[in-house]
Image (spheres, rainbow, N blue to C red):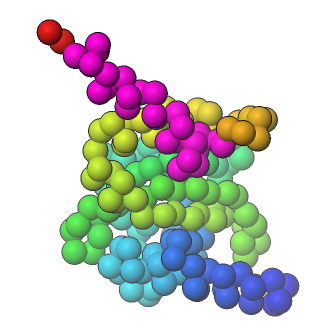
Amino acid sequence: IRESESKFRAVAETAPTLIFIFDGEHFFYVNPAAEAVSGYGREELLTMDPWLLVRPDHRSMMQERSRARLQGIPAPSRYEFPVVTKSGEERWLDFSSGVIAFGGRVAVLGTAVAITERQRAGPPRSALYPLSEPAAPAEDLPPPFPPPSTPLGQLIFALPFSLSLYAPHARPS
């Protein structure tokens, strides 16, 4: 067990991805990337209400999904949402989660990638991302077609839409 914990910490402490463990009410673990993106120090994060980081208009949805996940009820495991940093700045995260046993109880292992710049790219790029979400769990796609949840997959699915925006025949006269 100690070797596994040591390996986890080695990966988590050096990863540029936010990694955290929480039970829906408290963080049990946060890595340095979580500190960097949120602006809060490790001790601050471990003692604060995690939901205060989530932008208020997304908080209820996030809490519902977390409760469901912790109760073993299927809930989306990947989605995007905004957080508010210690300085009040808004940042967007591409979040993924799974349920683990931690300290004798059920907890969520969450990972997130900062995607604020992608969100700022605006439509059509950010508008197309939700279209690929329903297909993200598809694992039986033929090898030549990457899953829509990958950047290349998003580009392949977005290209015909983007081209239609610029097609001369599609412009009003």
Query: Residue at coordinates 23% horizontally, 66% vertically from top-left?
Result: 89
* Residue 143 falls in image quadrant: top right
Which residue lies at the image location 65% right of the left edge and 41% below the top edge?
147
Q: Give residue 146's quadrant in the image.
A: top right
Q: Is residue 154 part of the magenta span, yes or no?
A: yes
Image location (x, y in percent) of residue 103: 73, 76
How far across and down, in percent of the image, does residue 26 sit? 51, 70
Taking depth in this image into account, of 61 and 118 the one nearest to the observer is 118
Q: Give the range drawn in magenta.
A: 146-171
Main secondary-structure element of the magenta-colored stretch: helix
Expressed as whole percent of the image width and height from the top left, the position of residue 30 reads 53, 78
Q: Which residue lies furthest to the left in this view?
A: 173
- Considering depth in this image, is 60 or 166 the residue closer to the camera? 166
Q: Is residue 143 on the magenta stretch?
A: no
How far from the left and from the top, in percent, is residue 171? 22, 16
Q: Looking at the image, which is closer to me, 36 or 22? A: 36
130, above or below 82, in the image: above
Location of the N terminus by quadrant is: bottom right
Give above or below for 132 relative to 51: above
Residue at 53% over, 50% down:
151
Question: Looking at the image, which is closer to me, 39 or 146?
Answer: 146
Q: Mark yes or no: residue 46 visible.
A: no
- In the image, residue 47 sits, relative to residue 93, either above or below, namely below
Q: Is residue 96 left or right of residue 122?
A: right
Left-right relation of 45 to 17: left
Q: Is residue 115 left or right of residue 55?
A: right
Residue, x 36% and y 23% (percent of image)? Answer: 164
